[in-house]
Every structure is written in C-alpha cells, then in structure tokens.
Image (tube, rainbow, N blue to C red):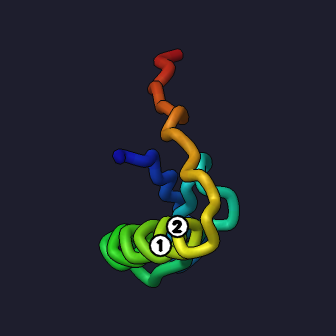
C-alpha cells in the first residue's frame, strides 16, 4: 500500500502525519529525519493494527497543488 504523508515545517522542526492512519504522526529535526520517522511509524502503526485484528484503512488521501 502507498499512504500519503504530509510533511510540514514548524519552526525548527518538521512534523509529518498520515491522514489515512489517524494517530500516525512524528516530529523530526530535519525533513529527511521526518520522512524516515514517518516511514517507521507507518510500519509500526500497520503492524499494531494487524496484531489487534483491525482492518487496514485503504489509502484514499491525495494531494494537488493549486496555482493562484
């Protein structure tokens, strides 16, 4: 599966979250660290859901740039 990860700069750090996996979020010192941490968080989140017998949500979020 391929999930959308939103990465946001916040002051001196980078936050990342996955809209289709509520509660799956991280904060890193750099963009690269944020990306690595969110990859790991997604894997752990999905693993935990499987262990609990919860259905995995389908990835439905998308992104689009809007030029103005």
Question: What residue is shown at x 52% (from left), y 39% (from top)?
Answer: 58
Q: Dots 2 and 1: beta carbons under 8 Å? A: yes
Q: How many marks?
A: 2
Q: Secondary structure at mark 2?
A: helix
Residue 59 is labelled as: none
Characterize the local packing of mark 2: few (<14), some (14-19) or many (20 or more) Cα atoms within 10 angstroms.
few
Q: Secondary structure at mark 1?
A: helix
Looking at the image, the residue that sits furthest to the front is 53
Looking at the image, the residue that sits furthest to the top is 68
Q: Measured from the top left, where is residue 2 in percent x and y?
A: 35, 46
Q: Measured from the top left, where is residue 30 in percent x and y?
A: 39, 77
Q: Is residue 49 left or right of residue 23?
A: left
C-alpha span from label 2 to label 1: 5 Å
Question: What residue is shown at x 47% (from left), y 31% (from top)?
Answer: 63
Front residue of this view, candidates 36 and 1? 1
Question: What residue is shown at x 45% (from left), y 26% (from top)?
Answer: 65
Residue 47 is labelled as: 1
Q: Measured from the top left, where is residue 16 in percent x and y?
A: 52, 64
Front residue of this view, candidates 1 and 50? 50
Q: Measured from the top left, where is residue 67 in percent x and y?
A: 47, 18
The residue identified by callout 2 is: 50
Residue 64 lies, with reference to residue 7, above or below; the image says above
């Amino acid at each position: 599966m391929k999930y959308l990860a939103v990465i946001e700069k916040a002051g001196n750090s980078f936050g990342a979250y996955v809209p289709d996996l509520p509660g799956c979020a991280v904060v890193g010192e750099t963009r690269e660290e944020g990306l690595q941490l969110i990859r790991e968080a997604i894997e752990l989140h999905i693993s935990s859901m499987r262990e609990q017998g919860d259905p995995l949500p389908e990835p439905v979020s998308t992104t689009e740039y809007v030029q103005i």
